Image (cartoon, rainbow, N blue to C red):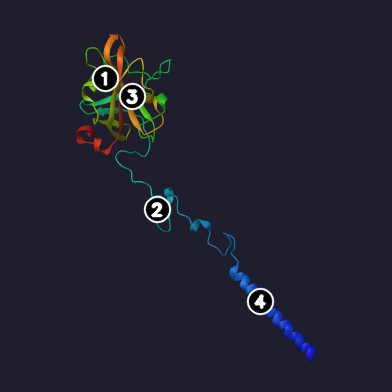
Amino acid sequence: MGVRQVGSARAAAVAAAVTALVLVAGALTWHPQAGSRHDPPARTRVVAPVSSVDRAPWPAPARHWPARRTCAQVPHHFAPVTITVSGVGGQRPVVRPAREADGVPGVPPLTTTGKTEFAWDRAQGIRPGDRAGNVLLNAHTWPDGSALGNHLLAALHRGGRIVVRGAGERLCYRVTERVEVPAARGMPRYYARRGPPQLAIVVCSGRRLGPGVWTKRTIWFASPSCSACSRSLTR
């Protein structure tokens, strides 16, 4: 082999070595796209959703764990069947009348049985256990003082306890507000569909002007409360 050939061979070898180093360096600095066989799948690097956190390969951050359910919460909403009120006694049945033609919530029947019942307004679309809005309830007030509304007016005040039961579920409430308003003015927030979950109970009050005509309305608002679950109300 001549000198020129040897020089050419050496130059070729040097060039090949340089090329190899460049390729190796490039391989060390190149980042493959997520999902290639060189990179763990993205799902192994994200926090597991709350619904499957028990199957996560490692614990998720504390802020992702679901809040512990309390006695003031239920896994799903339910239709009220009976209601117990402190100071009134007994589990009072709940009926579900349709709304009147003018859109006003229906009331219990004007019977001896009806005067002991609550009426729940299904058309409102809010049930105990929903995360927002008012569960609308009402009861009769009779001039002889014998109806459920009369007993509520006499015994139910702020701090009073209420237990609502459904088919296998129950929620405990504590009265947060009792307000009386003129019948002619009404109270629009009784119909609230947003805001904190509450019971909203209305009865006729004030002075009776005639059959079914009273000068005022008394409204109670009650919020879910663990402390409202006492033995006297949950037997």
Q: Amino acid at mark 3?
A: Leu
Residue 54 tag number: 2
The answer to the question of whether label 2 and label 1 lie on touching residues, with beta carbons closer than 8 A, is: no
> Which amino acid, mark 1?
Gly
Q: Nearer the viewer, residue 188 or 40?
A: 188
| Pointer 3 or 2: first along the chain | 2
Q: Residues within 10 Å of mark 4 (few under 14, many from 20)?
A: few
For the residue labelled by badge 2, is the local secondary structure a helix, a strand or a loop? helix
Q: Secondary structure at mark 3?
A: strand
How far apart are labels 3 and 2 at the CA level? 40 Å
- Which mark is drawn over residue 137? 3
Q: Is residue 128 left or right of residue 234?
A: right
* Residue 16 visible somewhere in the drawing: yes
Judge the density around disc 3: few (<14), some (14-19), many (≥20) Cα neighbours within 10 Å.
many
Rounded to the nearest angstrom, the CA distance separating label 3 from label 4 is 82 Å
Picture coordinates of residue 220, whole percent (x, y):
29, 26
To which residue does mark 1 refer? 149
The location of residue 56, given as percent across then percent down, is 43, 55
Q: Which residue is mark 4?
A: 20
- Quarter assignment of residue 230: top left
Q: Is residue 1 visible?
A: no
Whether pointer 1 and pointer 4 mark residues with C-beta atoms closer than 8 Å, the reply is: no
Image quadrant occupied by the C terminus:
top left
Q: Earlier in the sequence, mark 3 or mark 4?
A: 4
Check if mark 2's residue and mark 4's residue have beta carbons within 8 Å: no
